[in-house]
Image (cartoon, coloured by chain):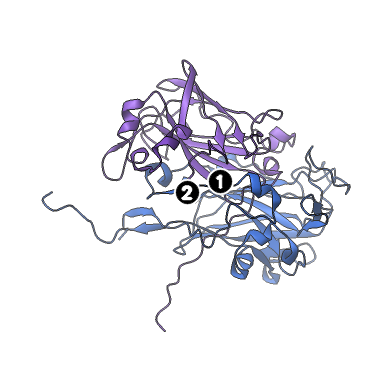
Chain colours: A blue, B purple
Amino acid sequence: MKLPQAGFIPRDREWQPDALTPPYKTSLKRSPQSALLSFPSTVSEETGPVFGHDILGPLDNDLIHNYAAEGASAIGPRIIVHGKVLDELRRPVPNALIEVWQANAGGRYRHKNEGYLAALDPNFGGCGRMITREDGSYSFRTVQPGPYPWPNGMNDWRPAHIHFSVFGQSFAQRLITQMYFEGDPHIALCPIVGTLKSPEAVSALTALLDMNATVPMDARAYRFDIVLRGRRQTYFENRPEGT
Amino acid sequence: MAQHLDYLKESPSQTAGPYVHIGCTPNFTGIEIYDSDLGASLKRGPVKGQEITVSGTVFDGTGTPLRDAMIEIWQADAAGIYPSPNGSHDPDFLGWGRSAGNMETGEFTFETVKPGGVPNPDGRIQAPHITFWIVARGINIGLQTRMYFADEKEANQGDPILTRIEHQNRIPTLLAIAEAPGQYRFNIHLQGADETIFFDI
């Protein structure tokens, strides 16, 4: 029997990063100071845009080739990133749009505001997208991004990372996060990773090398699962007395 | 000891960073891999209801406009119905929009339709509103708020959410002002005396 769905489980603000995190300096003037207004989700949050597979081009999830000249490919360690999108109740989230963006293998983004001296790769754009399958799974192919310096402290470097933007089935599930790579020593040093409140939260964003998903003699693989907010189910129907 | 509740934890959020536009509006940054940027238009064709323009700027705590933000909106159609697969909404209205803001000024603009009121779980009607979601460098977790319409006074006075806000003097931070017929302005202040009310829903 399919039970009717009720409102969303509240976001755990003790687990999620705070808005104000002084070691990440930009947060100082971009963090609201007042308490958030909390209330149970309504239809405005329990609905959301739906994206069909028809928006996708054949190379959208292949960052090695989607910006490359004919016959060329991006430079860097070839990897496959794959995983599942689940909700907090362990249910797969199908048809979720995932958009990813990243620096190239040298740590350089293709952006006019980017000032790092590492070389641009003419065959690497740095973005891709995909929609999860019925079992919530997704995968894309890319090159492993490099770490890079950024203006915060005098010598802060970002660990290698891939940005993820995820839509679930409702706007309440909207999430942007970053994936890090197992074993990167910059993870422990980064003020943005430092906005996470616990080692468990850092682990939740750290992808593991997955030798079982590699393509031998071609690409290594990393596994990165994503969890979106879950919706409660109503087991009992409540009706005010007398109705 | 007791049994273990085997819920998963939501993936922690991380800032969208300074290059969110590469991933979400790549055509805007000059990376032309996709046909067009998603969310560039809320309409597929002429839509039912009053067509409106919503413009605004996101300001930081010093009053400086953000020029590296990404703003998304989600709203019902003119009849108060959210688009959904096989739904009864206006078929030419998508309900969702995304803006990188103007490259020089940071101002965002959405060409949309004035939404109708939508039902509240308790059966009352919520005043017409548009949900906003703002991400940028320096924002660790996406900020959610709602835009209501200053010219919907009666509906706003009966709105189940607006009426439960403790500091009623902050409600103007949620109200879009009509600068001309159909032209609304909705500025968002991350901090300061005019700090927008942000939601946790």
What residue is pinned by disc 1?
A: A32
Q: Residue furthest left?
A: A242
Residue found at the very far top of the displayed protein = B181
Is residue A23 visible in this depiction of the protein?
yes
Q: Are marks 1 and 2 in contact (CB under 8 Å)?
A: yes
In percent of width and height, residue B172 lies at: 45, 32
Check the residue under mark 2 and report the chain it is in.
Answer: A
Residue at 59 percent across and 62 percent down: it is A225
Q: Amino acid at mark 1?
A: Pro
Label 1 and label 2: CA atoms lie apart by: 9 Å
Residue A40: percent from left, percent from top: 37, 50
Decide if residue A242 is on the left or right side of residue A77: left
Depth check, front residue: B187 or A118: B187
Mark 1 element type: loop
Q: Nearer the viewer, residue B61 or B145?
A: B61
Instruction: Check the image and report above or below for A32 versus B10.
Output: above
**Circle 2 crowding by C-alpha within 10 Å: few under 14, some 14–19, many from 20:** some
Q: From the top left corner, tell me how far across and down residue A194 is, in percent.
A: 67, 61
Q: Image point 39% across, 82% down: which residue?
A: B2
Direction from residue B24 to residue A75 in the image, left or right? right
Q: Which residue is mark 2?
A: A36
Relative to B51, does residue B70 appear above or below in the rendering? below
Q: Nearer the viewer, residue A44 or B183?
A: B183
Q: Secondary structure at mark 2?
A: loop
Q: Nearer the viewer, residue B196 or B183?
A: B196
Q: Considering the image in quadrants, where does the N terminus of chain B appear?
A: bottom left
